[in-house]
Amino acid sequence: MALTTAQRVRLKIQDAPVIADDTYTFDGSASAYNMPHVNLTSASAFIAGSDGQWSATGGTFNITGYVTFDTAYASASAFRTRYVHSNFSDAEISDFTAVGGGVDGAAIQAIEALMFDAVKRARWMAPDGSQFDDVAAQAHLRGMYNQLKSAQADDAIAGGGMNSWSMNQERYP
């Protein structure tokens, strides 16, 4: 079975859907809770019963990462969420494809979106010696970006794009 364009873009940028299965605690007053991910799909919510068994609820999920229950449940009672998430929504992938003009162009659009996010990347060290370095991701993204731009330019030349035309003009005045 052939992959769709969106699936090919996700494969190129390594944005495979991921399953999250987590347990949280109600606070007793809210009926909506923020999940740690966005672009949620295939989501289900469960509430712990008095017998310790999980039962399905009427919880509804929003693509922006919220689960909303029909009521505020008792404080310290548990709820479980199981959902699939990805970095980019299907609408974003479609937009990247339309703007980029194909799989490589869409991948470039996605990488540019991630590179813009670089201002949130950080490097720090805590007094206890633990370290965190997320700055290297920017260098990796830049390498992917350069590789894709080069492949896109090569494809344009091979396909008779403007670069090909101008190169031939130099050879055949």
Image (cartoon, rainbow, N blue to C red):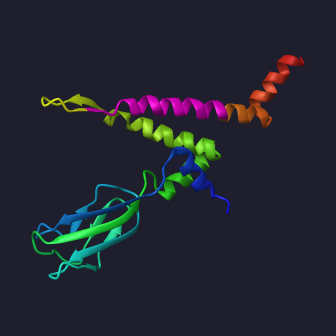
Residue shown at the point (50%, 47%) measured from the top left: 14
Residue 34's place in the image compared with 69, above or below, is above
Direction from residue 60 to residue 85 in the image, left or right: right
Q: Quadrant for residue 22, please give it.
A: bottom left
The answer to if 165 sits in the magenta stretch is no
Q: Quadrant of the N terminus?
A: bottom right
The answer to if 150 sits in the magenta stretch is yes
Residue 46's place in the image compared with 167, above or below, is below
Q: Quadrant for residue 145, please give it.
A: top right
Q: Quadrant for residue 4, please give it.
A: bottom right
Where does the image place residue 90, in percent across and percent down from the top left? 50, 58
Direction from residue 33 to residue 65 in the image, left or right: right
Residue 157's place in the image compared with 53, above or below, is above
Residue shown at the point (53%, 52%) measured from the top left: 93
Direction from residue 161 to residue 102 in the image, left or right: left
Direction from residue 88 to residue 71 in the image, left or right: left
Where does the image place residue 115, in percent across and percent down from the top left? 44, 35
From which residue to which does the magenta span run?
132-151
Outermost residue toward the right? 172
Where does the image place residue 20, in percent across and percent down from the top left? 35, 60
Viewer-nearest residue: 136 or 29 = 136
Viewer-nearest residue: 44 or 166 = 44
Where does the image place residue 7, in percent across and percent down from the top left? 58, 55
Q: Quadrant of the C terminus?
A: top right
Residue shown at the point (66%, 35%) measured from the top left: 152
Residue 32's place in the image compared with 143, above or below, is below
- Identify the main secondary structure in magenta: helix
Outermost residue toward the bottom? 51
